[in-house]
Amino acid sequence: MTEMVTWTCTGCALLCEDIQVRVDNNRIEQVEHACLKGKARIFGCKHVAVPAVNGAGVSIDDAINEAARILKGAKNPLLYGWSNSTSEAQMAGIELARTLGGVLDSTSSFCQGITINEIIKGTIPSCTLEEVREQADVMIFWGANPMSSHPRHLSRYSYFPRGELRQRGYEEDRTAISIDVWQSRTAKICKDKFYRIPPGGDAEFMRGLMDGLSGRVPKLSFDFDVKRILELAAVLKKAEFGVIFAGLGLVYSMKEDFGLLSEFMDTLNRFSNYSLIPMAGHFNMRGFNQNLYDETGYIYRVKFVDGKAASGVEFSVVEQIKHGADAVLVVGSDPLASLPASISRRLKDIPVILIDPCMNLTSQVADVTIPCSTSGIEVGGTAVRMDGKSMEISPLVQGVNMSDEMVIKRIIEEVG
Amino acid sequence: MPVDVGKFIKAPDYDIKVITYRDVFQAVACEEDYTGDECREMSAVIVLDAAEMKRMGFHEGKNVRLTSKWGSVVVMIKKSPREEQKGLGFMVNSPWSNALVSDEMLNGIPEFKDIEVKITGSNDEITSIKELFML
């Protein structure tokens, strides 16, 4: 039977809910409106995962039993990944970490977690993407390049659309600004509103802007036309609804001076109405932070002791892989590809269990591989968009594997 | 048999900072298959300013070795279509750039985007994914 369905995309944390997909006899035949990332997510990976223990094919039950045996025997297991899982699977992961007395962390630990933490705790104001679409007239892409990371961001929400208060769209009603170390695809769209700063110069540029906003002449240690900062400050002051899209360029540059960001937002909000949205990458990164916060009061880097949670940098995935964890459960992530090799190489020395629909680089060092269905394609649930909006996602087709939530629950049964 | 003197002369090296960025085309190719040729060809590349290439004696399409305290990779040079800041090279975020990243950090976030390396011309092959992880 052929049917055209409207689907919410899990290609990234924009969760575009306008994708049209033609499904014929449980096969995806045609996709409309999705970007490259969305289509890649829909059509899946080249090499699907198969259940294995120490490289040998086994039954799914044997793989789950071996995973449970490893985790039960570990003194300090790390449960990591989670940003490509539904909230339901994330909640199961929290329960497993609590049961094991283990450490729980997600990809947000070295991504947007630091920003999301400020927003969830209310120290940085935020808004929804719908508010951006309907109202925003000034937007800053700071260390962010959504044309590559979130390809439909500008066309669906931030820059190109007509909005309730922005009927003349990008041509007259919206000003897009890029602050970056190089001219990204997004910076090209911003044209003369591209401000090129040196690597690590974000905090100093931000202080310069705060000076400009407060009527002082900025002084910078690097070569930059002060007039351009003053002009930019004037544009920011005149905004009716401003939004900063914080990319990893900003987060990494400011990670040791992050308090400045809330000072900057306070300064902006003395003159206008400004919000910040973190450019979370994976489709449910923010969901993990929100779910864990609701359960424990912490957004990431949690260790459970006697059922109680503690959080600290020593429980971050990188510190744990370096010198903490004696077993690692990876769910829907590929730490061998995404972490510094100087850290991820240690995964070869400790037992690794991988739950994933696909073979990835981490599969090469995994002691146990447990295939699962792809969230948002073969299994539905709940996810949280980059701006914090909770959304339902529906499966497109029926897969052959269990969901990651079911796999985690099976492991809980075995170790409990 | 004549002695190849050239092979005993050390190629000059230069200090640069590698800045990483995201590219949707590379990301999709690698998500599909990290071990594939397309992922390697789109990842194992450093983008340099044309004037910087001239200063260092490098040519587009040639290989260079990037070495940090934490790792070393051979990648191919691509010329930036724009003028870039001096002393910088740009790499798409990938296992090749991650091979150069320090394991030292203060707050659980590695220095993914601002990596100090030495760059030198190389006749070696592009580093394979197996070599990166000694798989």
Image: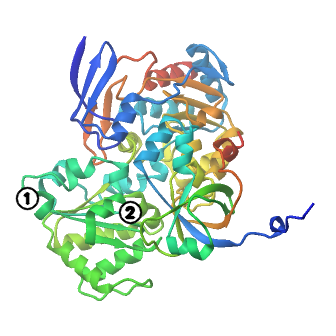
Q: Secondary structure at mark 1?
A: loop
Q: Is residue A340 left or right of residue A35?
A: right
Q: Residues within 10 Å of mark 1 (few under 14, many from 20)?
A: some
Q: Is residue A170 above or below residue B94?
A: below
Q: Which residue was labeled with disc 1?
A: A168
Chain letter for mark 1: A
Mark closer to the chain start, 2 or 1: 2
Q: Is residue A235 above or below residue A137?
A: below
**Quadrant where the N terminus of chain B is found in the figure:** bottom right
The residue that appears at 61% across and 47% down in the rendered structure is A320
Amino acid type assigned to the residue bearing label 2 in the image: Gly
Q: Position of residue A270 (x, y in %)?
A: 19, 73
Q: Position of residue B6 (x, y in %)?
A: 80, 67
A299 or A284, which lies in front?
A: A284
A179 or A354, which lies in front?
A: A179
Q: Residues within 10 Å of mark 2 (few under 14, many from 20)?
A: many
Where is residue B124, by image quadrant? bottom right
Q: Which residue was labeled with disc 2?
A: A143
Q: Is residue A210 above or below residue B98?
A: below
The residue that appears at 38% across and 62% down in the rendered structure is A143
Q: Position of residue B49 (x, y in %)?
A: 50, 70
Q: CA distance from mark 2 to mark 1?
A: 27 Å
**Quadrant where the C terminus of chain B is found in the figure:** top right
Check if mark 2 and mark 1 are on a common chain. yes
The residue that appears at 28% across and 85% down in the rendered structure is A227
Which label was assigned to residue A25?
Answer: none
Chain letter for mark 2: A
Where is residue A390, by image quadrant? top left
Nearer to us of marks 2 and 1 is 1
A151 or A309, which lies in front?
A: A151
